Structure formats: structure tokens, C-alpha cells
Amino acid sequence: MPKPKLLIVGAFPAESKAIYGGIAKSCKILLESSIANRFDIDTLDSSQISNPPPKLFIRSVMAVRRLFILMYRLIFNRIDVVLIFSSDGASAIEKGVMVWMCHLFKRPALIFPRAGNLISQTSRSPLMLKLIRFLYGHSTVFLCQGVKWKGYAINQLGLDKSKVKVVNNWTATEKQIEIGKNRKSELNNTSKLIFVGWLEKYKGVFELLYACNNLHNKGIRFHLTFVGSGNAEKAAKHFVKEHNLEKCIVFFGWANSQAVDSILEKSDIFVLPSWAEGFPNAMIEAMAAGLATVVTSVGVILDYVKDGEHAIIVPPYDVAALESALTKIILDTELRKSIASNGHQLAIDSFSVEENTKRLGDIIGMAMR
């Protein structure tokens, strides 16, 4: 019996393209999981064509092109079911149109929003809310990463409870879990911190820099590695130079999965002081690798992570709170070890690849009935 044909709309950039992000990582792991044994998978790449993103006109042309590609595949490629990953803003609208098209062609469509900022956008704009409510209302299943998203789908978008399914993040790989299991508790004079993600203001880059400058002025020893790039990189490098922090803060640039795992293995503390998130892959990967984590109370993080147990959680925008959290986790060795151990176990229990991709596959199968 032939396998059902599943079209996944997500981030599938060519290896030659330096395109990074949470959806790209999730899609890559998904294709490598056992879900590929259950479905005949076709992909439609919706990632941006460059970093930084091109002008709005170019992005609009690319979006229209993708809509025509989807229409063609729905007509001629015998697609049985469609899984659509979406971000916020224009991406959310484009993917909503795709959901509507699947409805027109009588194909089940599962929409999986991944950007926490979409909730904020629809709360600020009644027009955006009406548009997303209409478009996403045509989905067969609304997938979400936590209780907050589930409540949003039911209460703000007005979706029936039966259509809303929670699927946990699946980016805690076996490699990272093994790194965490083999981690040795060594007492280092200098704690090694790591930030992984876009170097943008909304990722809390400058709050982190100000907090680290204060730590440095107090004589607290640390070394911070920024892994990633973005619009704030130039200003961040200027800040480091201006405050004579070159010996304790470095910029690695973007790194592939193997390089990130290698840096995680050599690091002690992961920090991500974002203003907004969905559910950050980078945090899960750091937990799986046995790092103690410091994050902000955004997105669905609080649905899974307990402050003081799995991580130290601080408010966004708050330099003083971030500085205090970093001071505590750097100086209190036992606290750092406890948080790292608990976070590692949480990653194993809740965010492993096979357990969560199997659940996703089951939901896709049910959507086809």
C-alpha cells in the first residue's frame, strides 16, 4: 500500500545558502526522523532568499510564486495532506492563504504557527486578527507548542477545541542529549556563556551587553560567545570595543548544527533575553546539552519551564534582573549544576525527537480521515 503523500511548507534552504532559524532547524530534524517512514514527503521551501531579508517587493513576488507552486502541486502531484509552518506578519498571512487554498482543493491542512509575536500582532491590530481568524479557521488542525497558544487558538481565533492539538518542540537531538549526559562538573575560574540566535534588538542583545559590562566592572569572570548574526551585530561589536570587553565577549557568526553542538559542549551557561519568542529551539538544545539557562518570561516558555528549577527566568527588557540572574548562576556552583541537571532531564522527558515527531505523525494521520 503506497504511503500517503505529505507536503510540508517550511524552511528548506539549499545547503549553499546561509539561512538559519528555528523553523529551518525543526524542518531538517523532521525530515531526518521516523516520520519519513510513514509518509511520502514533498517539500515547499518558504525561507527567505537572503540574510538580511530582501525588499518587500521581492518578498511579495516570492510569496505569489509559492502560492502558484502550491496550487500546481495540489492539482497535479496527488497531495493527500499539507503541513504548513508559519511565522508572524506577512508570513502568517501568506501561510493563511495557503490554508484557504487547501480548503478550496479539499485537502486537509495543518497550520503550525511558530512565532510568539503573532499573538501580539493580532492583539494590537483588529484587522490582522480578523484576517488570521478567517484564514486559519479553514485549517483542519491548528498545531501549537503550549497552553498559551492553545488558549489563543480557542479564545482569540475562535477555533473548535477538537481542531487544536499541542505538539511539543522536537529539537532535543540524541547528540545533544549525549553531550549533556557526558558533561563533567568542572570548576572553572571563568564561566563560559553562550547566546545563539539572531543578533537583533528584540533578542535582548543590548540588555545582555549592558549586563555583561556591569559584571565585568564588578570583577566577575566570564566569557560570552555570540553565535549568530543580524542587524544589531555592528552596533554590538562597537559596544564591546568601546567598553574594552574584547577579551571576554566574542562574535562567532552563524554556525551549522555540528559547530553549535561543539560550542555547547564547551559552554556552561546559555542566555537568551528575548523580548518575544514562540518556544526557542536554542534553549531546548542548550538544556539537552546540559547547560544552565537564563531566559525571559516570553512566549510559551512558562508553560514548560519553572523558574529556579529548570532555568532562571527574568522579565524582558530588564538589565538589572538579567545582571542579577547571571551573577547568581555564575557564582553559585550548586545552583548552576542543579538547574543544568533539571533542564537536561526536562529536555529528555518533553522535547525528544522521536516521541514528538511520532505524535505529529499521528495527528497528521488523523487529519486525513
Image (cartoon, grey):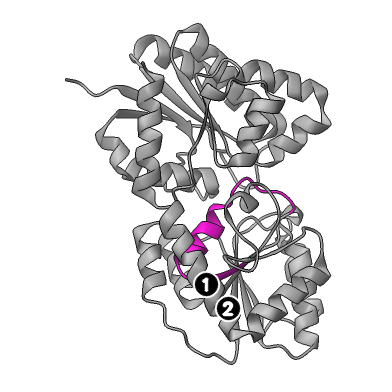
Q: Quadrant of residue 65?
A: top right
Quick check: 270 left or right of 43? right
- Specify the segment rendered in magenta: 275-293
What's the amino acid at mark 1? Ala
Q: Which residue is mark 2?
A: 336
The residue furthest left is 1
In the figure, is residue 212 to the left or right of 164?
A: right
Mark 2 is surrounded, within 10 Å at the Cα level, by few (under 14), some (14 to 19) or many (20 or more) other residues, namely many
Q: Which mark is residue 340?
A: 1
The span from disc 2 to disc 1 (Cα, nearest Å) is 6 Å
Is residue 177 depicted above or below 74 in this figure? below
> Measuring 49% from the left and 38% from the top, which residue is drawn there?
11
Q: Position of residue 60 (x, y in %)?
A: 65, 25
Q: Report x, y in % for residue 46.
A: 52, 32
Q: Is residue 239 visible?
A: no
Label 1: how many Cα within 10 Å (few below 14, some 14–19, many 20+): many
Identify the residue shown where x is 34% and y is 39%.
358
Q: Position of residue 367 (x, y in %)?
A: 41, 21
What residue is at 63 percent from the left and 58 percent from the top? Answer: 229
User: Is residue 124 in the magenta section?
Assistant: no
Q: Does residue 217 appear in the picture of this structure?
A: yes
- Quadrant for the C terminus, please: top left
Would residue 15 be found to the left or right of residue 131 on screen? left
Quarter of the view holding residue 250: bottom right
Q: Secondary structure at mark 2?
A: helix
Q: Are marks 2 and 1 in contact (CB under 8 Å)?
A: yes
Three-letter amino acid code at disc 2?
Arg
Q: Quadrant of residue 76?
A: top left
